Image (cartoon, grey):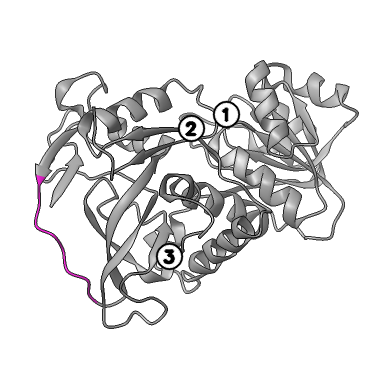
Amino acid sequence: MKVIGFKTSLDIEKEESLISFEKQKPTAENFDVLVEVNAVSVNPADAKIRIRSAKDITLDNAKILGYDAVGVIKEIGKDVSDFKIGDRIFYAGDVSRDGSNAQYQLVDSRIIAKAPSSLNDIEASVLPLTSLTGWEALFDRLKVSAFEKKTLLIIGGAGGVGSITTQIAKELTNLTVITTASREETIAWSKSMGADYVANHKDLINSVKSLGFENVDYIFNTADTIGHWDAMAELIAPQGMIASIVEFDGNVNLSKLQGKSAGFVWELMFTRSLFKTEDMKKQHQILSQISSLVDCGRIKTTLTQSINGFTVESIKEAHSQIETGKTIGKIAINYKEEGK
């Protein structure tokens, strides 16, 4: 089968930053299903791993990226009970295994779900990683109650995670949602996702307060943890909670939260699959609920751009755009269309 990956960390413009090669098609065993991949989306995680994981070294075996996919099950392992050959599924996968930048991919059946029937492949492919991240951040990390009337600040409202988390929060909770954006187009996008208010992240404290909020009960940082730390510490309410998905170099002053008895927690969507946690199957349940919410019209795709063709050039184009840090919503690649 054809796969695309990398052996050394290079700027995306370099010829060998991503390479195409052939690999033996794997066989499904145990809880795995073998999927023929139809479409994928590209996330910041793809670019980060490509840039950081093979600096100044050459890997013996190329790393295959891709952490979102829609495809059709072609084989099932002996322990698979919830799916059958021919099912159309979507998933984010496992960062420790080969990704979806391949014609075929093995994925654990406990972290997949049937794709929304109301969306085509590229529309559905942009949802798994971001919706799992947003759902886990809200309900597993921040412990949001569906009934409490509190405030949530999402830093990075126009990105993939911010976009879907806004929708989930507005559909499944009573939270007042404030997102951040600074450009006319990102402000408009955030509002179209359901944000009640939009603050400017370039002057976060004053912007949030000018909207009439001295404090917020929850903060979900999808953009810049260390850069917004002081602002988050000031804006978080007493006994509030902050969650982030953005790692950082250096230190933050965690003691800034002490006086308020406020908490800080990380969200990493890959934790359940990496550590094979007892509740690993919850990702199947979350994705199933997302699929249902989409099919009943309560949540919409965050797709803003699609690229055709399972080619090095297509994936490089998506990485280049992701690395600008200015993309709105999500970018998908349709494998079933010919490249340029």
Work out how far the residue at label 1 is from the one at label 3, CA to CA, in angstroms: 31 Å
Give the vertical position of 296 relative to 327 (above or below): below
Q: In the image, is residue 23 part of the stretch drawn in magenta?
A: yes
Provide the residue designation for mark 1. Answer: 226
Q: Residues within 10 Å of mark 2 (few under 14, many from 20)?
A: few
Q: Position of residue 89 (x, y in %)?
A: 41, 62
Quarter of the figure with the C terminus = top left
Residue 111 badge? 3
> Which residue carries the number 2 mark?
248
Secondary structure under tag 2 reads loop
Q: Does 301 appear above or below 212?
A: below
Q: In the rendered structure, are the residues bearing label 2 and label 1 in contact, judged by CB atoms less than 8 Å apart?
A: yes
Q: Residue at x 54, y 69 (%)?
A: 285
> Mark 2 or mark 1, which has the lower sequence index?
1
Q: Residue furthest right?
A: 212
Q: Residue 5's image quarter?
A: top left
- What is the distance, in whole Å, between disc 2 and disc 3 at their CAs? 27 Å
Tell me which corner region of the image, top left, top right, bottom left or bottom right, holds residue 15: top left
Q: CA distance from mark 2 to mark 1?
A: 6 Å
Q: Earlier in the sequence, mark 2 or mark 3?
A: 3
| Camera sees residue 275 | no
Name the kind of residue labelled 2 in the image. Phe
234 left or right of 316 in image: right
